[in-house]
Amino acid sequence: MKEGNAFLKAVLPAMLAFALSGVYAIVDGFFLGHAMGDSALAAVNMAYPLTAFLQAVGTGIGMGGAVCYSISLGRKEPLQARRYFGMMILALGVAGILLTVLFLTLSPTVLGLFGAQGTIFDLGKEYLLYISFGALFQVLGTGLVPLIRNMNGSVFAMAAMVAGFLTNILLDWLLVWVLPWGMMGAAVATDLGQAVTFLACLGYFIRHKKKPRFTFLRQGKTVLGQILRVGLSPFGLTFSPNLTLILMNRFAALTGGEEAVACYATISYITSVVILLLQGVSDGTQPLLSLSYGEGNRRVTGRYRNLAYLFALIVAAVCMVGVFLLRGESVALFGTSVATASMVAQALPFFLAGFLCAAVSRVSTAYFYATGKNLWAYLVIYGEPILLLALLLVLPGAMGLTGLWLAVPVSQAGAAVLGALLVWRTSQRTC
């Protein structure tokens, strides 16, 4: 009972926080789709993987630091925990500055490589220009939230995300519909929403007197290396849906043209919230897993892992039913054309079974990186997009759009099976 209460207290706020982190792009899509049509909707969808890369870098560094912080506390090493805190902040700041420069110079080229052309390319380029100006806020806003959760501040972390999300909605309405500034307005709204989240996190550290330590006693490289090794897994877990998005956009353009890209844009918006809810379950469990693992309590660690599996599968099943029943209303939300809406209605059911598979794979990977089993996490996380690419090279050519849509749930199933097998193998070794 005690572990169940601790689990729900940690997971429920994390679920909402992760869902909101992905709703930024959905909100942009909602306002732009209604204001500017299918081309703007497809442009945001094409550009979003780059925006998500910023957030994934922040999440990876932040989660890497948070895992190391919790394990150190579990081992009764508070000074080392503060060193991880300090190094994490330095890494987030440097990453934010470097990514600002890279995005300003390279994002149009990358957008073209994603398959954006014509009007979609022009609109996406404009969106990314203004996203680049707020890259530092994107990295810091997403990077500090995981550490606050690991400081027993899961409710505050959720509140910080809610504040940023509400700011984004208000500014999207003002800058896209009222003024209107179009793509620039949506990007600025996203930047300022993340800035609000960052400022809220900063206020938390000041109020609760959470002080990082910036003296590393010649351990700087070791501390940074450990953060990055752990962080590579949550980075991949956060960004892997966008690797799927990049690949699917590319092959959708080749298989069905702009209409298929707009179709998948709508599907990705709908399904991304579910995937992020599942990631909220897995990453909300992470502080509990890391702390119990650091304390050497493997039995409790296993219980938290199993609770995460059960809860994630329940969430996935409920979302499958809900998305299927509300598929018509979901499509209408984005103001798509009649032709695109019809295509979405036919394609969306292919993606529902993947929810159950994503539940298993995300809990498995979170368990691995929360307990220092980084190699297993890498295999599951990065194996999924590799399998997806292999399937996309075969299925669309053989089955057309049906093969295109089938590639996603099949790759998710492969990752789920691999993750479950590796967890079983790990459990057998510790028995």
Image (spheres, rainbow, N blue to C red):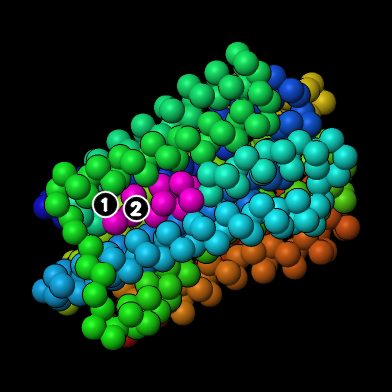
Q: Which mark is residue 80?
A: none
Q: Residues within 10 Å of mark 2 (few under 14, many from 20)?
A: many
User: From what the image shows, is residue 290 above or below residue 145?
Assistant: below
Looking at the magenta stretch, what is its main secondary structure? helix
Q: CA distance from mark 2 to mark 1?
A: 7 Å
* 397 lies left or right of 50: right
Horizontal side of residue 318 vs 72, given as left or right: right
Foreground of the two, 312 or 296: 296
Q: Which residue is mark 2?
A: 144
Queried whether the magenta region covers residue 138, the answer comes back as yes
Give the magenta part as a residue range.
Answer: 136-149
Q: Quadrant of residue 103?
A: bottom right
Classed neighbour count for the residue bearing mark 1: other residues with Cα under 10 Å, few (<14), some (14–19), many (≥20): many
Q: Quadrant of residue 264?
A: top right
Between residues 115 and 416, which one lies in front from this camera angle?
115
Q: Is residue 6 magenta?
A: no
Which amino acid, mark 2?
Leu
Amino acid under label 1? Ile
In the displayed image of the protein, which residue is found farthest to the top?
178
Depth check: 342 or 203 in front?
203
User: Can residue 334 be seen from the camera position used here?
Assistant: no
Rendered-image quadrant of the C terminus: bottom left
Q: Position of residue 118 (x, y in %)?
A: 88, 40
Q: Which residue is mark 1?
A: 148
At mark 1, the secondary structure is helix
Q: Going 76% across and 36% down the picture, which residue do you hit?
A: 123
